[in-house]
Image (cartoon, rainbow, N blue to C red):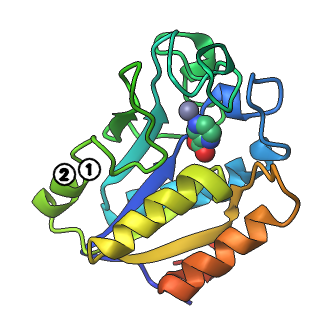
């Protein structure tokens, strides 16, 4: 068992409608992580830990969109239904929303990139983050890399993440990389 307590925070990465089945950049099985994520949210609430929810929050002409020469279909356009957090995600009222890649010319996979998340965490004396969300091989991976580089300890919740898998195996490779970099990969039921 891995007990959560003071100094810990939960970071929920990009659990937005466009990344769920039916969305414009759907992660297959993306909705299957919701029970594990909600379990983590429940633990965070019980322990009084801060919860951060990152979101892709793009302008309609964002550089990552195919029409602008980018790799992705349009997704998570600020203010649209597709950019809303999944209805089944039980975010607490007090969750801190962290928007990223909000200008046309900048993309950001990491929740730390251009968001001030590092400062927010430091202000709350957070030294370890529990990470879940979408997608394992893009925004979760980039967020975990940055967190470790910035000196946070990181727990990745295996059943609370799901991969895009542009190439088969990308999700497993991303988990292996995060582990090699020092992240702990655990199942949600191992947390308490
Ligand atoms: C993401 C592709 C494009 C993600 C965001 O949240 O993993 N992936 N934008
Ligand atoms: Zn994006």
Helix, strand or loop at mark 1:
helix
Can residue 38 be seen in this snapshot? no
Q: Is residue 61 left or right of residue 160?
A: left
Q: Are marks 1 and 2 in contact (CB under 8 Å)?
A: yes
Q: Where is mark 1, residue-wise?
A: 117
**Mark carried by residue 120:** 2
Q: Quadrant of the N terminus?
A: bottom right
In the picture, measured across the screen, residue 31 lies left or right of residue 138, that is right
Q: Residue at x 30, y 55 (%)?
A: 50
In front here: 136 or 93?
A: 136
**CA gap, disc 1 and disc 2:** 5 Å
Q: Classify 10 Å Cα crowding around label 2: few (below 14), some (14-19), many (20 and above).
A: some
Q: Residue at x 55, y 50 (%)?
A: 139
Residue at coordinates 67% horizontally, 80% vertically from top-left?
176
Choose between 162 and 141: the one closer to the eye: 141
Q: Name the spot of residue 122 as percent of width and height, x first.
A: 15, 62
Q: Quadrant of residue 114?
A: top left
**Along the viewing direction, whichever of 141 and 124 lies nearer the viewer:** 141
Mark 2 near ligand 1 (CB under 8 Å)? no
Name which residue lies at 43% across and 51% down: 110
């Amino acid at each position: 068992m891995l007990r959560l307590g003071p100094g810990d925070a939960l970071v929920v990465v990009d659990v937005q409608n466009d990344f769920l089945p039916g969305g414009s950049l759907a992660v297959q099985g993306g909705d299957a992580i919701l029970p594990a994520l909600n379990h983590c949210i429940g633990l965070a609430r019980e322990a009084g830990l801060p919860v951060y929810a990152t979101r892709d929050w793009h302008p309609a002409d964002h550089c990552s969109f195919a029409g602008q020469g980018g790799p992705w279909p349009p997704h998570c356009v600020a203010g649209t239904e597709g950019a809303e957090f999944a209805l089944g995600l039980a975010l607490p009222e007090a969750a801190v929303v962290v928007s990223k890649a909000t200008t046309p010319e900048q993309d950001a996979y990491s929740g730390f990139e251009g968001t001030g998340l590092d400062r927010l965490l430091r202000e709350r004396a957070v030294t370890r983050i529990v990470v879940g969300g979408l997608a394992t091989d893009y925004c979760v991976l980039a967020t975990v890399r940055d967190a470790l580089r910035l000196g946070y300890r990181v727990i990745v919740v295996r059943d609370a993440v799901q991969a895009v898998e542009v190439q088969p195996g990308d999700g497993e490779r991303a988990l292996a990389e995060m582990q090699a970099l020092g992240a702990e990969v655990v199942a949600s039921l191992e947390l308490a």
